[in-house]
Amino acid sequence: MKYTMQEISNMPLPFPLRLRYALHLCVACLALCSPAAYAQKEMAITLDDLPFAYARQLTVDEQRVAFESVLEALEKHAVSAAGFVNGVHLTKEKAAWLDAFAEAGHRIGNHTFSHPDLHKMSVSDYMQDVDKGEESIRKWLGTPKYFRYPFLHRGTSPAIRDGVYTMLCDRGYEIASVSIDNDDYLFNKKLVDARARDKELDLRDDYIGHILERSRYFEALAMEKLGRPIKHVLLLHMNYLNALYLDDLLQAFRDAGWTFVSMPEALNDPVYALPDTYAGPKGLSYLERIESANPDAAPRD
């Protein structure tokens, strides 16, 4: 199914949202006419749940060392990353970590205050948490402001999805969509839980293999849906797992032919301006939220 200009005009949405979708579709259609303008295998690195995710029995000092290890890996590979913060975990000491993150040239965005699930609360309560999150990180927010939905949950109905999106846009946010989703958080939980039991695990090969496989999958999905490579956005987390393996992961990406771009550069790819057509319980890659814009694509079952 593809949306025409007339169909978008007839959508039961507020006029500003219909207009935004119509303009986005124009940009995306122009991009499809010149796929050669997009280099292959480009990726932005993003990290959720700053200052630190799922620490369990790690001391604050151990978390700090892990945070610094992630920064060192990003610097080594000349990556300009973006990090999304849950303000509930900020302390005076951890605020200094965000200072270091920003001073290293990385962007900081809002990931809400307490990482709530939009699918389990009212829209008004959710937006209050968004606003509280912004207040907690105001000193680090740049222009434009970026927002990422916790759990990648955007709404179980079109009304909720479009209503929250409109309110975020009205607050001046750009949505930091994800094209390459994965299970790094599950690898981290396994690693941290084992460490809490004084058991050391080596998940390097399994983790890197998983991320590379997910990247290949979403590369193929982009080609299927758009008929061209896109600038991808990879979702990772600021956690103990990536403190150990991010350096090796970034090198594995380089060895596989990937180059790294900033998140703003990646989000300029017109794919992220295509209308979000999914409303439901899943947290999905943006590539799974859009309809095919490739005239040569075979219909999906």
Image (cartoon, helix red, strand yellow):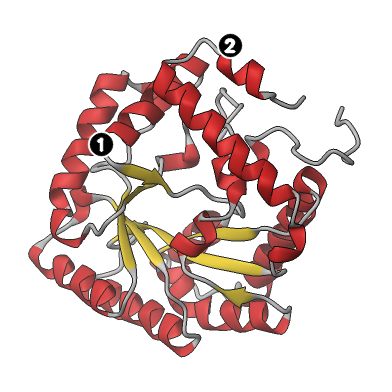
| Quarter of the figure with the N terminus | top right
* 66 and 82: which is toward the camera: 82
Q: Is residue 288 above or below residue 49?
A: above
Q: Would you call the spot at circle 2 few (<14 residues within 10 Å), some (14-19), or many (20 or more)?
A: few
**Residue tagged by mark 2?**
10
| Residue 233 image position (x, y, % from top left) | 55, 58
Answer with left or right where residue 90 lies relative to residue 273.
Answer: left
- Left or right of 272? Residue 7 is right
Q: Position of residue 266 (x, y in %)?
A: 53, 61
Q: Is residue 62 above or below residue 137?
A: below
How packed is label 1: few (under 14 Cα within 10 Å), some, or many (20 or more)?
few
**Between 184 and 129, which is closer to the camera in this rendering?**
129
Q: Which residue: 65% across, 77% down?
A: 253
Which residue type carries mark 1? Arg
- Residue 228, visible in the rendered structure: yes
What SS does tag 1 mark?
A: loop
197 relative to 255, above or below: above
Q: CA separation, marks 1 and 2?
A: 26 Å
Image location (x, y in percent) of residue 101: 28, 73
Task: Tell me which amino acid carries mark 2.
Answer: Asn
Judging from the image, what secondary structure is the residue with disc 2 in? loop
Q: Which mark is residue 171?
A: 1
- Horizontal side, residue 185 vs residue 60: left or right: right
Q: Nearer the viewer's eye, disc 1 or disc 2?
A: 2
Residue that sits furthest to the bottom in the current view: 76
Q: Residue at 48%, 40% (x, y): give it.
A: 152
